[in-house]
Image (tube, coloured by chain):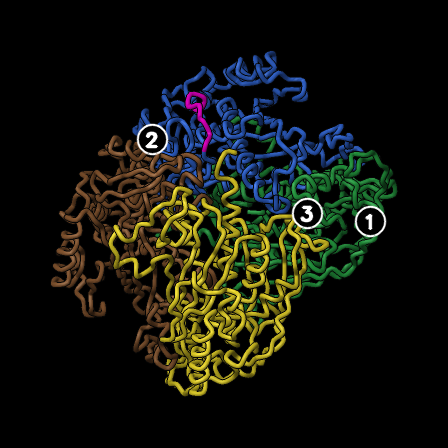
Chain colours: A blue, B green, C yellow, D brown
């Protein structure tokens, strides 16, 4: 109930604070018999790792995952997969200055109100460091999903937006630049913008688009656990996310039904896909796609006035090594969460008919 | 797992198809000792009822809720509250023409792919009629929440948008017009637009905004079950919803951190509220607000080409009595789902500290 | 969380008090495509019905189940099955004398301590009437399970015990007598004993044995949700149950390992079955069997001293129509709960390997 | 769903195989603000540790718990408590001889049938080594429960039974002997019996009794999640358990209602306690007590015939270091599971009334 688990049948539970001994997780419900490519898992973690480029935080953490259980001779056994990522570069002293300070638009104040106690070092449990565990689990989910392709990419940084539909993009180009935008010209602009913002000690928001291809029709539950509702929750659970839309999204609210309806082809596919691959909460076999909005990182390096836990006004200034924009490192996190949702629904689907 | 339940501690399970004997639900976990106002519950149902105005479906259904358990001498007993709403106006014959037809952008095709069998009458389980049960449960949740105020209203119909921040609106005016928009001038335009669309046999989308006030700080779970993530899922689970954003939302992705951060006052409140009342997934005591985008209703009264279950092209035309725009009747549904989420987190919060 | 649901994938939620409008339930997760025999469901309810013989309560209630959803043209649709059993013979006045009285070894006192309010009529939610909903769901589970056979029978009433292993019994004889014991001679003795006890206004306990045959190997979860642990919980959740043992049971605790181990045949079956069909929490394909101990009914017709809610000593005497021994009517309840457990694990099993 | 979690609000998830890198777990939902005594936790683990006396397995494993998260400056923070116990003494070679062999009355065969693959070393996930993680979590639950006392002890080894009611025993004597029986004379007999059995290379079963004192009235859920049903499941989930009874237990099934009913005192306590502290599934404030039956350990050191995975008859002989009787090491496990159940219900209780 305390909300550290995700998924029903393919279920991830994570633990760990940013500056504790380690973070990690347990995947319960991963089917037996999957031959795992452990390098591919580490590779996903590397996509999320700090220090990977000049436009992300310069913290150096290897973020090496160690598996403790659930895998025998390289194959999943059906028992829980326990894993750990040690925290090696915690400079706890960096945080002594904020011990009693509530940083604006961070979770310091709300954790104190909720729990009455908190590990203030680096945001503790509220740090996005927790998402490294999600990336590990998502990487395993991806291997289970096999022929289902999940590609996320940066579609906006501030006002700089990718202006093509995803069908015109080459997903192979996503990893060719540090912002993870498959259009190289736009990517350059985004990178410049972030570099500029960074020099000012400021931060900026952005949007990630995700496309899931080769999903069979019939995934999703019809009422509360609609496929897109669970995808929405998954995305909104990622740090700094402010919005989610799929298919026609907010633009769809401006349309007429005569325009918005997706006409069927005789094979059951549709000529347009304003539905975003989901109808009535259930996948229809078309591409699933959605947008995820991220706010600017709350930690800026500019001086700010704020309050401390005694309600006194204090001045603070972010130090240490922070991301000027979360979007490039969030791309693998979006993919991981999407993979966890789809894996879960693939398993849920197995018992729905009497065959 | 089959997704017909919502909530963890304050939990609603619904059942029922649009043209079966009845729909209904079970609320498990409603605390004992709440003196219920049963008229207030029926009143919420009436806000959702078909036939309430000229801009909604003209079906006439009384939608009277009957309680079977869990309430004794007007007070909740802590045992499950079972309730039923009889289906009295099911004209099943209206639907015989679509028995084998997959209506575009409906759930006919996906249900068939998922279950191999379906109750095709009126959309069966995929019909928004199911949401009447949510409204009943939400009305009880509201009574439990007591001093927490939840107000939803129509903020856009197609391109006609409410252009004021919610702080400048008078929520008492929401129920003064049939579109449920608290600005009377805009409301008039919205109503005209829908009437016009209706004459064309077409439909149109819209946006609902919801504001939750007097929420104590400390609600929400920090990782996967962030308060806004659960609100997002709740909203995305409502029929026809395509997007959700809270606080600064998608606009927030264009901002700089130096602008986006909400500065604290000494009492812990904030000067701005781009956070939308939630920081790190946990309420901070400020107003919670969010937008929900609805697509245009898929059933138009215009002729459409589509396919049947044999993959043959057929022509169809919606008949019967349908909503030209779901938004006015969806306002109480948005409120109900918000109330269910907040009630659940109010209970979840009770065991989080050792006091 | 409030404990009115059972099962993970094949999930029953019940509602209803003994003297409210109706009891009922929702089955969520029943696979689509099962052709249901509705008479067989009612027949199971009739096995549990009051007034069926001279050794059970003489209340007359038809206990007719009405289905409201989830079944279309006789076939399950995969959507929730909502059902209701109206309470037709509630003589609430029978209970006004116990409104403030805590009956010994009943749940009156504990409900008051827990909820601070209760429906005192006929035990309210604590009445075994709730199990009628379980019997409905169990009857549907049985039809899903198809070739798996579940037979429960009375193996003891007080000190009168069935003295043969179940392999020597003819399960077809269970329904030939009103105590539901497949050995006619023992059955006669049990019936006489109950009749005698009844004349004294007293009650007596008993034991039910249940045998599940044709269960495939591989059902059950290895750690907390061992198959026999869930069966145990299911049985212990039935009113008046005090103990559960499977396979060698309590006798097994007295044995040596060299005697207790079940030797394998070359086909994987075992020569003995002290394991009771479950090893390491997982079925091995052998018969699953277990015993369930029931205490004597707490309501006797003799005068008793007790206290009221003000802590004053009062005298009370059960009136109305009560069972002198719950065991004969509990036989179908034991089978229903066993069916629910096995159905759930049959579904759980579907996603455990990567095939 | 895969059954590696226990509890609803105070929730333990365990991972790990007997011969993997480590076992461990995550406790999610432990309230914030508990000052933990870490030595007391390790002390509970030491009570379960191999090699602690001559009547248990002579494996030497330190079983040191390491906490990775959820505790800050000695106090629980409300975030998940991740912990690990490294496997230091895995002699995997000891098990190469059983790689393809199905040991009688072990879980080898059933795991293969379920998963198609298994870690055969030392029983893998089916090893009772997993219970060390439960002991860690239970020790934390005990500290949360504070003034609620949970005492388990050995009440039978084979036919040697403790013949006094628990009220006449001195729980302080439980830890004074290696069998953990509070009656020293009986303890001696039990120890001799086990030593004798061990010399024969055989094993023997036993019974553990557990008494929970100072539980407030009102714990437990009324229908499926009755307090004793959850305790029963908890106990039946422990390796080698074959039966569970509480209060009057199986003996109660032989009694008359006039004898079995517990008469109230004016303060709500009862003169007898055949109910075992639970009425209608809810605690009544009296002592809760129950018995747990353990079968003899399946691994004997005698030669046995069995089959391999090809269905061929083979001869095998247990080697390595095994327990002749699980009961002495299971005492802290029974207490741990009882503590987890009670902690969970203490939290569940917090939201049941509207106060």
Residue C206 appears in the picture as rendered: yes
Snapshot quadrant of residue D168: bottom left
In the image, residue C65 sits, relative to residue C108, either above or below, namely above
Snapshot quadrant of residue C36: bottom right
Q: Which residues are drawn in magenta?
A: A33-41
In the image, residue B293 sits, relative to residue A45, either above or below, namely below
Chain of the residue under label 1 = B
Q: Residue at x 73, y 54 (%)?
A: C73
Residue D49 location, x and y as percent?
Answer: 21, 44
The residue indicated by pointer 2 is: A95
Q: Residue at x 53, y 76 (%)?
A: C121
Nearest-to-viewer mark from 2 and 1 = 1
The residue indicated by pointer 1 is: B96
Residue A64 location, x and y as percent?
Answer: 36, 24
Residue B14 location, x and y as percent?
Answer: 62, 54
Q: Secondary structure at mark 3?
A: strand
Q: Secondary structure at mark 2?
A: helix
Do the residues marked 1 and 3 share a common chain? yes
Q: Nearer the viewer, residue D194 or C226?
A: D194
Q: CA distance from mark 2 to mark 1?
A: 68 Å
Residue D67 appears in the picture as rendered: no
Q: Tell me: C61 left or right of B63.
A: left
Are the residues at dot 2 and dot 3 in contact (C-beta closer than 8 Å)?
A: no
Are the residues at dot 1 and dot 3 in contact (C-beta closer than 8 Å)?
A: no
Q: Classify mark 3: residues with Cα within 10 Å, few (<14), some (14-19) or many (20+).
A: many
Residue D332 location, x and y as percent?
Answer: 25, 52
Q: Residue at x 27, y 58 (%)?
A: C253
The residue indicated by pointer 3 is: B153
């Amino acid at each position: 109930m305390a909300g550290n688990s995700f998924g029903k049948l393919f279920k991830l539970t994570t633990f760990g604070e940013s500056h504790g001994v380690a973070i990690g997780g347990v995947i319960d419900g991963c089917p037996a018999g999957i031959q795992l490519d452990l390098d591919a898992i580490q590779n996903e973690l590397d996509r999320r790792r700090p220090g990977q480029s000049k436009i992300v935080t310069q913290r150096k953490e290897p973020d090496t995952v160690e598996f403790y259980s659930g895998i025998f001779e390289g194959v999943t056994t059906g028992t829980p997969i326990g894993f750990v990522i040690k925290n090696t570069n915690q400079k706890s002293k960096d945080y002594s200055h904020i011990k009693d300070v509530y940083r604006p638009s961070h979770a310091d104040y709300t954790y104190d109100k909720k729990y009455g106690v908190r590990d203030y070092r680096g945001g503790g449990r509220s740090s996005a460091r927790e998402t490294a565990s999600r990336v590990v689990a998502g990487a395993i989910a991806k291997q289970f999903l096999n022929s289902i392709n999940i590609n996320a990419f940066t579609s906006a940084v501030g006002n700089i937006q990718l202006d093509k539909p995803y069908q015109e993009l080459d997903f192979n180009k996503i990893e060719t630049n540090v912002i993870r935008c498959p259009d190289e010209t736009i990517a350059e602009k985004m990178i410049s913008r972030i570099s500029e913002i960074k020099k000012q000690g400021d931060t900026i928001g952005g949007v990630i688009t995700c496309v899931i291809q080769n999903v069979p029709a019939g995934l999703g539950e019809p009422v509360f656990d609609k496929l897109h509702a669970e995808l929405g929750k998954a995305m909104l659970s990622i740090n700094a996310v402010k919005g989610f839309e799929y298919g026609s999204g907010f633009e769809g609210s401006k349309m007429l039904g005569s325009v918005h309806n997706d006409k069927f082809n005789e094979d059951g596919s549709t000529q347009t896909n304003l539905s975003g691959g989901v109808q009535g909460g259930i996948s229809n076999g078309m591409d699933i796609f959605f947008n995820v909005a991220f706010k600017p990182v709350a930690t800026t390096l500019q001086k700010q006035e704020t309050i401390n836990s005694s309600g006194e006004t204090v001045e603070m200034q972010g130090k240490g090594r922070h991301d000027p924009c979360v979007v490039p490192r969030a791309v693998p996190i979006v993919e991981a969460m999407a993979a966890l949702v789809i894996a879960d629904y693939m398993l849920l689907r197995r018992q729905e008919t009497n065959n």
